[in-house]
Amino acid sequence: MMTAAGVLTIDLAIRDASPAALQDDRQIVDAVLAGDREAFRPLVDRESASLVRACQRILGDQLQAEDAAQEAFVAAYRSLASWRGDGPFGAWLARIAVRIALRQAARRRTVTWIEPASEPGSAAEAAGSSPDPASVVLRSERSATIRTAVAGLDEPYRETVALRFFADRSLAEIAHETGRPLGTVKTHLHRGLQRLRSALGERGGDL
């Protein structure tokens, strides 16, 4: 995971799970901290797909999502010692990735995303039809509007909404990783969604 120039990189390619992937996360992290860099690979293999998916939901662009996930893995690798080990590693990692993706989304003035056309062999193709271009644009604009609105929320609402709906994390996991009481997380989610609906209403969208 280190280049000849000494730059840390994380290969996000999905590989077959190795026996090490079945080990306890704490054991894996301890091995990495003890100097075994390759011990980090099972965690990358296991979490890559969900991490890229969460980032893509925020950024709306596959390549940017992969870059954000890569950055998140590097950040996690460098701060492994800060993982307490008393909660899911994936939830801790997801919080890092969501923060990175939200930061990137907030820096952009616009979010551009176009849904892919029907894949060969899809139901639409089998029926001899293709998506209505107007409806594709409308869905794309709506998705982009939602992502932009989420990125524009104040903290802690932005992080809570993103972790719940983009990273698919439970309220209990969010409470654990943020160090906030479960009741507080529920309140943040409720108020965040209220603010999101209000922002979408001003933009002419809906939730």
Image (spheres, rainbow, N blue to C red):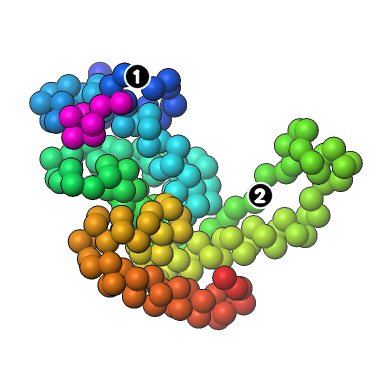
Residue 1, can we see it?
no
User: In what quadrant of the picture does the C terminus appear?
Assistant: bottom right
* Residue 98: % across, % down: 36, 53
Q: Nearer the viewer, residue 44 or 88?
A: 88
Q: Earlier in the sequence, mark 1 or mark 2?
A: 1
Instruction: Tell me if residue 136 is in the magenta stretch.
Output: no
Q: Nearer the viewer, residue 7 or 49?
A: 49
Q: Is residue 70 left or right of residue 23?
A: right
Give above or below for 63 relative to 142: above
Q: Which residue is at the far left?
A: 34
Please report the bounds of the magenta region as a residue range: 22-28
* Residue 162: % across, % down: 41, 60
Classify mark 2: helix, strand or loop. loop
Q: Is residue 15 left or right of residue 125?
A: left
Q: Amino acid at mark 2?
A: Glu
Instruction: Check if mark 1's residue and mark 2's residue have beta carbons within 8 Å.
Output: no
Q: Quadrant of residue 138?
A: bottom right
Q: Is residue 115 left or right of residue 134?
A: left
Q: Nearer the viewer, residue 204 or 128?
A: 128
User: In what quadrant of the picture does the N terminus appear?
Assistant: top left
Q: Residues within 10 Å of mark 2 (few under 14, many from 20)?
A: few
Checking the image for residue 18, the label placed there is 1
Q: Quadrant of residue 143?
A: bottom right
The residue lying at 62 percent from left, 77 percent from top is: 204
Q: Amino acid at mark 1?
A: Ser
Residue 186, can we see it?
yes
The residue tagged 2 is 115
Nearer the camera: disc 1 or disc 2:
1
Give above or below for 57 relative to 12: below
